[in-house]
Image (cartoon, helix red, strand yellow):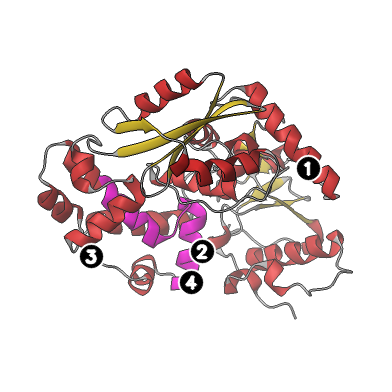
Amino acid sequence: MLTSLCTMGLHVGELLPKSPMLNQDTVIQVADEAKWEAVLTRNSLQDGEFVYAVASTGIYCRPSCPSRRPLRARVSFFDTPDGAEAAGYRACRRCEPRNGQTSAARRVLTVREYIDRHPDEKVTLERLGEIAKMSPYHLQRTFKRLVGVSPKTYASARRLERMKSRLKNGDTVSRATYEAGYGSGSRAYEHARARLGMTPGRYRKGGRGMHIRYAVVPNALGQVLVAATDRGLCAVMLGDDASGLEASLRQEYPAAVVEATDGELKEYASQVMNQISGGEEKALPLDVQGTAFQWQVWEALRRIPPGETRSYQVIARELGKPAAARAVARACASNRLALVIPCHRAVRESGELGGYRWGVERKRQILQQEERRDSLSGRTVPAS
């Protein structure tokens, strides 16, 4: 008898046999059986993951719909309400799969509101699970699916946003860190350096005192500017001329000390240039500012293998925010680190390239170069 996969919170892939003979039909069959088990148990945690449609009634529902269970042979599954309606089904009036928040979403909202109201409390997953009436494991999974980050990362981002707001409004560093919920000044400094690229005091002064070194190197794409602080890369820009790139860098960091150098940035520049020419992509130290959502998008971009693309919509769904495709595109446009954070691998749903901060033609060249490299290596590039 099939174990209640969805109720246990297990991914289908965790239970599939590690066999080279496993085919796609088998994967789909096991996945559908897991969904059917969620329907049978009215598992509200699966609301939003898929809908099920009943051939005899022409209606589709949430997994948690309280209506009478249909026969398995009459049921088919769709990832979204749009998919069900495209197949000719209409939404159930009882569970309203298109309207309102799911039970899981309501519970996650409760947790977010609790975190927002208790900035100075170091809450645990166990405590948050009690608040949401979910197991810590299910809360972690569901929160990350719906919000895009874990509860711990969300709390950290909200604390930083509060500190930034207070610093901008003129609070002293000590008062801003205290009001934001940091338990100690050292923790606030550590967090600010990691996410802002500067101390809280320097952020309060608009970045004054930052020391940025840069070098401009010619290559097949035109000119590449590589800039870094003592903590890591803060900008990688593509353009047609060195003076224009230097002006853009100074505009990004108006209060910083910016100076040209060659030797100190030789290692960074060579590694970035190596990526452009199809070499191995290495993890480089980064020193860039971004909101919690921007960092989610940028990290999703870095997970896309060279030679592959993802649509803005697909990335939004991966982050658990299917309606945030435009916000994903804006996060790509705000990326200061060309190639290092590969926003060129994000395209429109239609497959069109879409915009690119450093020119659509450069985006096309980079993708073509990656595709050629994968073709020569014999790797098949899947469709976006």
Q: Examine the structure image and report whether residue 13 is included in the region drawn in magenta.
A: no
The residues colored magenta run: 136-161
Using the image, determine if residue 254 lies above or below residue 235. Answer: above
Q: Which residue is label 3 attached to?
A: 121
Q: Which residue is label 2 attached to?
A: 141
Disc 4 + disc 2, Cβ < 8 Å: yes
Q: Nearer the viewer, mark 4 or mark 1?
A: 1
Is label 4 in a helix, a strand or a loop? helix
Q: Which residue is label 4 attached to?
A: 137
Whole-Å distance between the Cαs marked 4 and 2?
6 Å
Position in image of residue 295 (x %, y %): 45, 46
Q: Examine the structure image and report whether residue 138 is included in the region drawn in magenta.
A: yes
Residue 274, image quadrant: top right
Mark toward the start of the polypeptide (2 vs 3) = 3
Mark toward the start of the polypeptide (4 vs 1) = 4
Position in image of residue 68 (x %, y %): 65, 61
Q: Amino acid at mark 3?
A: Glu
Whole-Å distance between the Cαs marked 3 and 4?
21 Å
Foreground residue, 256 or 307? 256
Position in image of residue 72 (x %, y %): 77, 63
Q: Nearer the viewer, mark 3 or mark 4?
A: 3
Mark toward the start of the polypeptide (1 vs 2) = 2
- In the drawing, does residue 81 fall left or right of residue 246? right
Mark toward the start of the polypeptide (3 vs 4) = 3
Whole-Å distance between the Cαs marked 2 and 3?
22 Å
- In the drawing, does residue 307 fall left or right of residue 111? right
The residue located at (37%, 62%) in the rendering is 152
Kindly tell me whether residue 165 is visible in this rendering. Answer: no
Q: Amino acid at mark 1?
A: Arg
